[in-house]
Amino acid sequence: MLASGGRYGLVRLWDPERGEELRTLTHPPLLDALAWGHLGDRPVLASGGRGGAVRLWDPERGEELATLPDPDCVELAWGQLGDRPVLASGGGDTVRLWDPMRGEELCTLTHPLLLHALAWGQLGDRPVLASGGAGMVRLWDPERGEELRTLNHPGGDVLALAWGHLGDRAVLASGGGDTVRLWDPERGEELRTLTHPSAGWALIQSWLVIALAWGQLADRPVLASGGRGGPVRLWDPERGEELATLLDLGDEASALAWGQLHDRPVLASGGGDTVRLWDPMIEHPAESPGHDFAAGVVPVVVEVASYIGTAGLAGIIGARADAALTAILNWLHRRPHNRRKRQAGWLFRAGWLFSKVHNRWQHRAKQANDPLSEREAIDAAKAAALTQGYALADLADVRARQEADGSWRVTLTAAGDPLRAVVPPGDPSHAKILIISS
């Protein structure tokens, strides 16, 4: 079972194999954190949010089991003290430890300044709780309520924490800014730093790491990182090398979780209004209900608002750039100057085409969800292809078919490559166009 949460108090439980929603839980007024745990032999889901409380749920029945009074909760993490489960909730400058069986608060830890992340780990035979905030990580002995040490993480707030192992050694990963740091928590030493490539252009919002998750591919540990302004990345934490990039082109990857489907590892990423499941071995979504993705098919979502009003590489008018544009600008930045100038022109042509489609649609549309005309859909698909690095002269064999919901399926070839585009109905300036290449 997979749980996902929205800011305004809705928790959705999913069957990840079928891509079906099982049930919805309501956590008023705001939802900031979710965490799976166990009470005895039954799974329990904890939800928390500012202005409310921490709630414990029976996910099988959709019933609330208990309420724990923490009005500042933005983070949750399950752990063990001896043979009993313990839930940590954190927010503001406070971490609370709870006995979820009795609904009792065990102790309170003070984390100076704002707290953004919590994670339980183990050093030898003793449990350790890590909390992250303004430029530092604090390690706690949760049994005694004492701080063990502080790890300095310069470059911004620590927004994500995750424990893993390299061999028989415990390792803690902390993420903040454009950096992931790996620590030996026993010695308090930094082992290495993983840096996400920045856009290199002032107009692009820089990468901000807000999610980390340790997993296992075959017999080697893998660390996944995600955030705002770029794709999900998989790392070899032993060598400090990037293994793969998963093009999650939603608003952000604000949450990551590893699981299993049919005995194969699967990575879930969540952000905006979308949860994506990935087969990390082949670098494309493992399940995506409603779209016929097959092995070897690479889906890309082009956010039109990112390109409308493009006047030059000095600035973009409108919405922030999506990850596809960020990747292309990174690529252009590494090209020879004469090629860079020509290829950058394709982005401007894409913005011009998108604007043209928007103006035509706006002139005749009577309702917000009116579909595009065939000509508008074709031009929008061509503009989306330009954002992927193709030239207008490369595009040929264009055909379009309208679906019952008003969307258009456009097929074309781009420099000999077959492409399919799904262009939704409604205002094209707010559209997210799906491009599928195989």
Image (cartoon, rainbow, N blue to C red):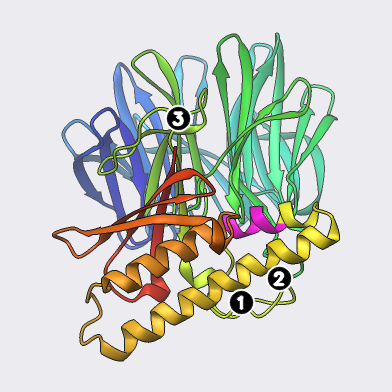
Q: How many marks?
A: 3
Find disc 3 in the rendering and name its residue. 296
**CA separation, marks 3 and 1?**
32 Å
Kind of residue sitting beneath label 1: Thr
Q: Earlier in the sequence, mark 2 or mark 3?
A: 2
**Camera-side residue of 366 and 289:** 366
Mark in the foreground, 1 or 2: 1
Q: Which residue is drawn at the image coordinates 29% and 42% (left, top)?
A: 291
Residue at screen point 40% across, 78% down: 357
Relative to 364, is 211 above or below?
above
The amino acid type of the residue labelled 3 equals Gly
Task: Say which residue label 2 marks.
Answer: 203
Quadrant the N terminus occupies: top left
Give percent across and percent down for residue 271: 45, 51
Q: Please provide percent x and percent y for residue 219.
A: 60, 9
Instruction: Assess disc 2: are there few (<14), some (14-19) or many (≥20) residues with their C-alpha within 10 Å of its C-alpha.
Output: some
Quote the CA–CA distance across marks 1 and 2: 11 Å
Mark in the foreground, 2 or 3: 3
Mark 2–mark 3 distance (CA, rounded to whole Å)? 33 Å
> Mark 1 falls on what kind of element?
loop
Check disc 1 and report the residue beneath it: 310
Span colored in magenta: 323-329
Q: Earlier in the sequence, mark 3 or mark 1?
A: 3
Residue 417 at x, y = what percent? 49, 43
* Residue contact between numbered discs 3 and 1, judged by CB atoms under 8 Å: no
On the picture, is 145 further left or further right than 302?
right
Q: Quadrant of residue 194?
A: top right
Q: Is residue 206 left or right of residue 426?
A: right
